[in-house]
Image (cartoon, helix red, strand yellow):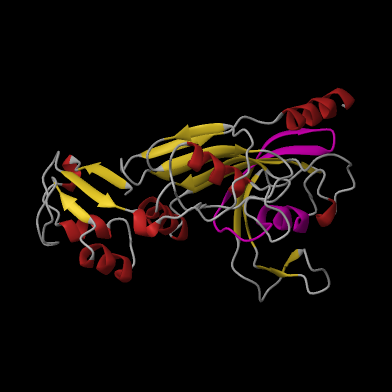
Amino acid sequence: MDILNFEVLKKEENLTILEWLENFHLSNKTLRDIQANNLLKLNGEIVDFNTKISEYDIISIDISSFEENNFEPFSKELDILYEDEDVLAVNKPRNILVHPDGNTNQTLGNIISNYYLSQGLNRKVRVIQRLDYETTGVIIYPKHYLAHSFLDYELRNQNIKRIYLAICEGKISPRQDTIDKPIGKDRHHNNRYIVYEKGKEARTNYFSLQYKKNYTLVMLSLGTGRTHQIRVHLSHLGHPILGDELYGSNIQCPLMLHSYAIEFMHPRLKQNIRIEAKLPYEFNKVWDELWKKS
């Protein structure tokens, strides 16, 4: 059995069990399964879902039937930025896939799978946001289905703030703006996306932090989460990210795009937390070299 214990918060007092569960935005099927199989207990007792809860009550949920390790484990060290019972945040290295693609099992998902097993957890690997193969930085893995359902809802409702740093070509003007341009597949190139009027809604907010020579250090946040969104939008403006050959950069270097921070409501604590990933060595090295050339 795999039991999660939750201590009822002051702000949750007088909710019914059903209302408490609904705060995780679980599907109706999942709610029925929990109730039908007596997977939830209040202070050690099976209770009706209309039972009201009080501060400091303990809600226990057997999550075993919803969790099973789903990726072949691959042993490699993780750079863990934050971890508790519900959330794991790691610093994704460059040139690694987030999930298996059918061609390799040496992905971040496989490493997470191995880490869970090493901790005695038979858990399904779930991720909230995805990062491209070349992109570095913070990425969030909910450690169970309740946390995943809650955070997925928060992401879909644009309540999770994802902040990136990039070095792009040219001087971006205006210094601060929102790129509101739909994105779709480039039918002439299998792996590329383009700004396309019939594409999906896409919004990227940016703020130029520094400009030197012919390059800009820019901070970006996502209003939506389309594939390659930041890369497509900056390229569309005529300011491709350094090292992004796919989207027009002629600079030979690693992709200068880093997932710097993520801010979200914690599924258990119901408090906002912020997790940051420091810039990788290559990012700082490229920026320093650009300064020296000026």
Q: Residue at x 54, y 33 (%)?
A: 80
Q: Is residue 72 left or right of residue 5?
A: right
User: Which of the pair 92/143 is nearer the observer?
Assistant: 143
Report which quarter residue 278 is drawn in: top right
User: Which of the pair 95/120 is nearer the observer?
Assistant: 120
How many numbered discs, if any? Answer: 0
Which x, y percent locates residue 283?
Answer: 74, 32
Task: Inspect the magenta stretch and tell me whether residue 210 lies in it.
Answer: yes
The correct choice, above or below, for 153 with respect to 169 in the image is: below
Q: Residue furthest bottom?
A: 198
The correct choice, above or below, for 243 with respect to 290 in the image is: below
Q: Is residue 177 left or right of residue 186?
A: left
Report which quarter residue 288 is drawn in: top right
Which x, y percent locates residue 129?
Answer: 55, 52
User: Which of the pair 137/172 is nearer the observer?
Assistant: 137
Which x, y percent locates residue 2?
Answer: 33, 48
User: Which of the pair 51/76 is nearer the observer?
Assistant: 76
Which x, y percent locates residue 42?
Answer: 14, 49
The correct choice, above or below, for 78 with respect to 39 in the image is: above
Task: Inspect the magenta stretch and tell me whether residue 201 lies in it.
Answer: no
Give the position of the C terminus as an image quadrant.
top right
Magenta stretch, residue numbers: 208-237
Q: Residue at x 49, y 52 (%)?
A: 69
